[in-house]
Image (cartoon, rainbow, N blue to C red):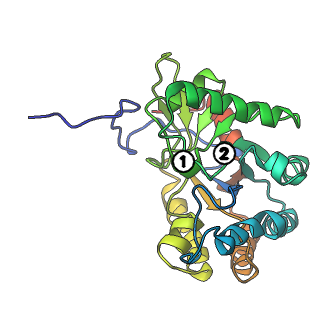
Amino acid sequence: MTELAHHSRYEYVPIIGRPDYSWPEGRRLAVYLGVNHEVFAFGDGMGATLAPSKTDPDVMNFAWRDYGNRVGAWRFMEMFDRLELKTTALVNSAIITRCPGLAEACRDRGDEIAAHGRTNAQAEGHLSENEEREMIARTLQEFEAIGLRPRGWLGPWISESENTPDLLEEAGFDYVLDWAHDDQPTRLDTRSGKGILSIPYSQEINDIPSIIARHQEAETFAGMIEDAIEQLLAECDRRPVVLGIALHPYIMGQAHRAVHLDRVLTRLRKAADSRIWWTTAGAIAEHMAEGPGKPT
C-alpha cells in the first residue's frame, strides 16, 4: 500500500498543551490587516473575475481589478489613517513601475511592506527551482529600487513549489504567509535546518473566497470579522492567537463594501479591548524572534 505523501514542512502538534506566552504588554490576540496590492497583465494571465468575460481582452475584469489601485487602496488608507491602523501591505513588486507612488504611499504611512511576488497574473508553483529563485531575486531588486527590503512573503494565489520555503529562507526572508494551517506562528522545516516562520494568514477571513467564491456580500464578511474576533477572544486567555484579515482594494475597497469594513473596524477600535494587539505580520515575526515562546 502506498504511503500518503507528506510535505515534511511541519509535524502534527495540536494547539492545546503548547507553551504559553503573550504578545507585547501582555496582550493575547494579535490582529493584523493584510492588504493585497496587486497588478495584472492586460489580456493575459490569471486574475479574479467579477463576472464571466465574453471576449478577450477582458476589459471588464481588468478594469475592475485596476480600480483597487486607482481608488480602493487610497480609500483604505484614508480609513486606516482615521482609525490609526498600520497594515501589512502585501505588494506585487510590479506595482512599483505600474502604479508609481502606491507602494511608496504605503511605506510613508508606516505600513509594513511584505513581498507578494511580482504580479498576480502568474503563479509560482509551476516554476523550476532556478526560475523561482530568479523570480524571487527580481522581486527583491524591484523593491530595492525604492529603498525597501521586505522580510515577509505571500505567494501570488498562495502558490508554492516543492522548493518555495527553502528558496525564501535562502533569499533572507524571515516569514511566509502561505500556510493557513494554524492560529499561532509555526516553524516550517527547510533544507538548511534553520527553518522559516509561518504566520497565520486567513483564507476564511479573506474577501476573495468570501465575496468572489461564495458570493457573500460585505455585510456578511464584516460580520465574519467580528465573529472571528469574538471567538478568539474567548480562547486567548488559554493561549495566544493570531488573526490576519485579508483584504483586496478592488473588492472591499469598493464604496458599497468599504462602509461595512469601516463600521466593524470602528466598533472594534472603540471597544479598545486590552487583550488585542493591533499589529503587522512583521511585528509578530520580530516578537517571535525574541523568544517569548518556541513556535511548534
Q: Tell me the number on the disc at residue 200.
A: 1
Instruction: Please name whichever residue, 107 or 102, is drawn nearer the observer in this view of the structure.
Output: 102
Disc 1: CA contacts within 10 A as few (<14), some (14-19) or many (>=20): many
Q: Is residue 278 left or right of residue 191?
A: right
Picture quarter with the C terminus: top left
Q: Which residue is mark 2?
A: 116
**Element class at badge 2:** loop
Residue occupying the far top of the picture: 192
Residue 48 to residue 141: above or below: below
Picture quarter with the N terminus: top left
Residue 232 coordinates in the image, percent (x, y): 52, 60
Residue 83 coordinates in the image, percent (x, y): 82, 66
Residue 286 to residue 106: above or below: above
**Element class at badge 1:** loop
Residue 110 coordinates in the image, percent (x, y): 86, 48
| Mark earlier in primary sequence (2, 1) | 2
Q: Amino acid at mark 2?
A: His
Number of marks in the image? 2
Taking the spot 62% from the left edge, 57% from the top edge, the residue there is 44
Q: Amino acid at mark 1?
A: Pro
Taking the spot 35% from the left edge, 43% from the top edge, the residue there is 14
How far apart marks 2 and 1 lie (CA) works out to 15 Å
